[in-house]
Amino acid sequence: MTGHDVDPLGFSSRAIHAGQDPDPTTGAVVVPIWQTSTYKQDGIGGLRGGYEYSRSANPTRTALEVQIAALEAGSRGFAFASGLAGQDTVLRSLLAPGDHVVIPADAYGGTFRQFDKVARPWGLDYDIARVTSVDAVRAALRPRTRLVWVESPTNPLLGVADIAAVAEVAHEAGALLVVDNTFASPYLQQPVSLGADIVTHSSTKYAGGHSDVVGGLVVVGHGDDHRELGERIAFHQNAVGAVAGPFDSWLVQRGLKTLAVRMERHCDNAERVVEFLLGHPAVAQVLYPGLPDHPGHDVAVRQMRRFGGMVSFRVRGGEDVAVKVCAETQLWTLGESLGGVESLIEHPARMTHASVAGTALEVPADLIRLSVGIEDVDDLIADLAQALDRLG
Ligand SMILES: *Cc1c(COP(=O)(O)O)cnc(C)c1O
């Protein structure tokens, strides 16, 4: 549905139809995997549908790019080989050596590494702020701040940033706001509608949703300034070339079509798991934006449809106990990543966030992070119960 306006349609209608016109030659209702590098020209420069070479554009990737732009209520989408590849392209497109950025205190570990070990040696300067506090973001701004980077909910502490308020503060300072929307997914939260300029995703997570693909997505907002941002990102996507391949693009597209039903089930299950954890004596604290006493709850109610499938909790007894719980579950798979149909458990301090040990981004050693999947929730709870009960 590229020749048709999908804007008035609901979320799932857009997920299933945006960019997904039936194939004109066969009527195939699913966009084919156009596994081709190049395209026949009808005379020099006579391109069919604008396709010339698959780094520059490929029809399967285009379909995904149209689909994600529609889901994020943005004007233009881009698909990359990984979330980090998309982020790198955003940084190269928008920043120059000498520029300053503000990054979140509990950023995804790979994001922090990208800023600290790749962008900083290249000449970028950064400050770290607790993005859950608008005042902290404001205090971290410098005259050369060009960009504020936000995740919400944050990883792994599940703090909530007030995206609309941070957008205002960033814009007053002449900076752009980028929101990594991986944890919420476009179903639960649409940052462009809250004032963000650019949205990024690791489509490896909820967008793909089946733990079978690594990918990244970038969406820009509306308006003349954003059209220009889109042009710059398009230029760098082609010039740097970290694009999503046709099969990976196809997998993410398929995942996005069921995003709404998956997210509803992730949220249902997460709420039940939270309830169970709150009642267990081995659990010291549960971190979930859906809890009324969570410090970001009111903001989450305003900017999110529901509270997501990620749950973190701290155990009594410290790091050893946390490590043991992770080792004792059967149905919950010990593993990094998140957002797939299967439930995962991990120990951030030793796994996903090991690279930030000893920095301002260090996470508590007694913390366990859950990616609550869409299995039968009673089975998930029973498995957590046997792992936690074993400690007592
Ligand atoms: C996984 C992840 C990334 C990085 O994406 P890759 O696809 O692994 O490159 C970035 N941000 C968040 C929040 C993530 O969870």
Image: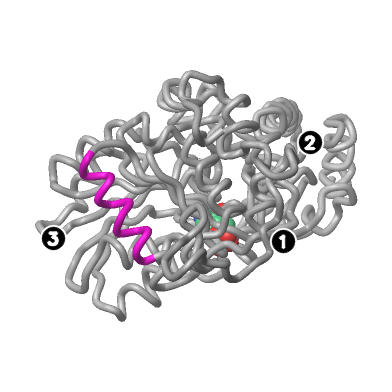
Q: Position of residue 193 (x, y in %)?
A: 37, 29
Asked if residue 300 is positioned above or below residue 186 in the image, the reply reads: above
Q: Amino acid at mark 1?
A: Asp
Q: Amino acid at mark 3?
A: Arg
Q: Which residue is mark 1?
A: 320
Q: Disc 2 marks which amino acid?
A: Ile
Q: Residue at x 65, y 32 (%)?
A: 16
Q: Earlier in the sequence, mark 2 or mark 3?
A: 3
Q: Secondary structure at mark 3?
A: loop
Count of all numbered marks drawn on residues in the image: 3
Taking the image as shown, residue 261 lies to the left or right of residue 245, namely right
Where is residue 376? Give x, y as percent: 87, 32
Q: Which residue is mark 3?
A: 144
Q: Which residues are magenta?
A: 224-236
Q: Can residue 279 be seen?
A: no
Indicate whether 348 appears above or below 315: below
Q: Height in image: 188 above or below 285?
A: above
Q: Nearer the viewer, mark 1 or mark 2?
A: 2
**SS under mark 2:** loop
Number of residues whose C-alpha sits closer than 10 Å to that of mark 2, classed few (under 14), some (14–19) or many (20 or more):
many
Q: Position of residue 365 (x, y in %)?
A: 60, 59
Q: Is mark 2 within 8 Å of ligand 1?
A: no
Mark 1 to mark 3: distance in Å?
44 Å
